Image: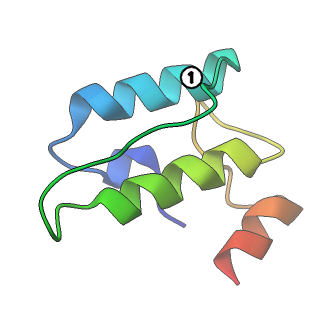
Amino acid sequence: MATFQDIIGQEQIVEHLKTAVKTDQVNHAYVIQGERSSGKEFIAKVFAEALQCDNQKDGDACGECHSCKQAEG
């Protein structure tokens, strides 16, 4: 399972998304834009997994709970 640490070169957005997850202050929508193959879908997937996780670890998905196992499958 990927975590925010696996995202390279996007420190500002990663920090913003991790803080949103940790403080439970998530906006109703996020626009992730960039060039083709820049990792937009990967960032969205990591963020979605973190939001759905039952046992978040420092803003990241734990990879062990029921929600994380469903996301992997």
Res. 13 image quadrant: top left
Residue 50 on image: x %, y %:
63, 46
For the point 58% across and 32% down, which residue is it? 59
Name the residue tied to disc 1: 20
- Say above or below: 71 vs 39: below
Q: Is residue 24 above or below residue 18?
A: above
Q: Nearer the viewer, residue 43 or 22?
A: 43
Residue 7 horizontal side relative to residue 51, left or right: left
Question: Where's residue 28, x and y in %?
Answer: 64, 31
Identify the secondary structure beneath mark 1: helix
Q: Residue at x 20, y 49 (%)?
A: 8
Residue at 60 percent of width and 25 percent of height? 27
How far from the left and from the top, in percent, is residue 21?
Answer: 62, 28
The quadrant in which the C terminus is found is bottom right
Q: Is residue 62 above or below residue 45?
A: above
Quarter of the rendering occupied by the N terminus: bottom right
Reply above or below: 8 against 67: above
Determine whether, in the image, residue 41 is placed left or right of residue 19.
Answer: left
Q: Residues within 10 Å of mark 1 (few under 14, many from 20)?
A: some
Q: Amino acid at mark 1?
A: Ala
